[in-house]
Amino acid sequence: MHIRGDHTELVVGGRLDVRSAADARTVLHDAVDSGRGDLVLDLTELDSWDATGLGVIMGVHRRAGRANRRLVLRGVPPQMQRLLVATRLHRILAIESQP
């Protein structure tokens, strides 16, 4: 898993799973805490996520809300979009529309 960017936009790539969750959580929470406005997570390079990875995303969403910020997911791969719909998380998370 790799994350690059700043406190307003981050690109998340590789696998967001139980092995990478702690590192991802640290980086993403730091981004929330050090910025203002929307925090955009670009997921176009994300290969997969498991339940733990999805939990990290939800935790960042809650933390952003407490910091008066909004987490926005961009470039959600189709299979992950289907999971968000199946779990109804697409109703909670801000997801940019695909063109």
Image (cartoon, rainbow, N blue to C red):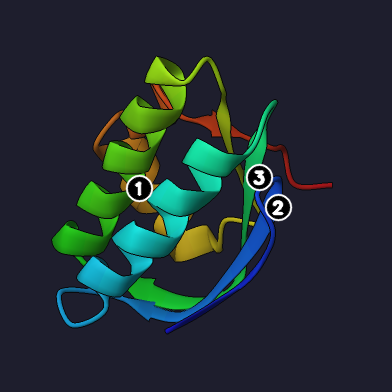
Residue that appears at 27% across and 52% down: 56
Q: Residue furthest front?
A: 34
- The residue indicated by pointer 1 is 57
Q: Amino acid at mark 2?
A: Glu
Q: Are marks 3 and 2 in contact (CB under 8 Å)?
A: yes
Position of the N terminus, as image quadrant, is bottom left
Element type where label 1 sits in the image: helix
- The residue indicated by pointer 2 is 9
Q: Amino acid at mark 1?
A: Ile
Q: Which mark is residue 40?
A: 3
Name the N-terminal-most of marks 1 and 3. Answer: 3
Q: Amino acid at mark 3?
A: Val
Residue 45 in percent (x, y) is at 61, 77
Q: Are marks 1 and 3 in contact (CB under 8 Å)?
A: no
Residue that appears at 48% across and 38% down: 33
Task: Place residue 42 in its image quadrant.
Answer: bottom right
Closer to us: mark 1 or mark 2? 2
Comparing 77 with 13, the one in front is 13
Element type where label 2 sits in the image: strand
Quote the CA–CA distance across marks 1 and 3. 12 Å
Comparing 93 with 77, the one in front is 93
Task: Place residue 12 in its image quadrant.
Answer: bottom right
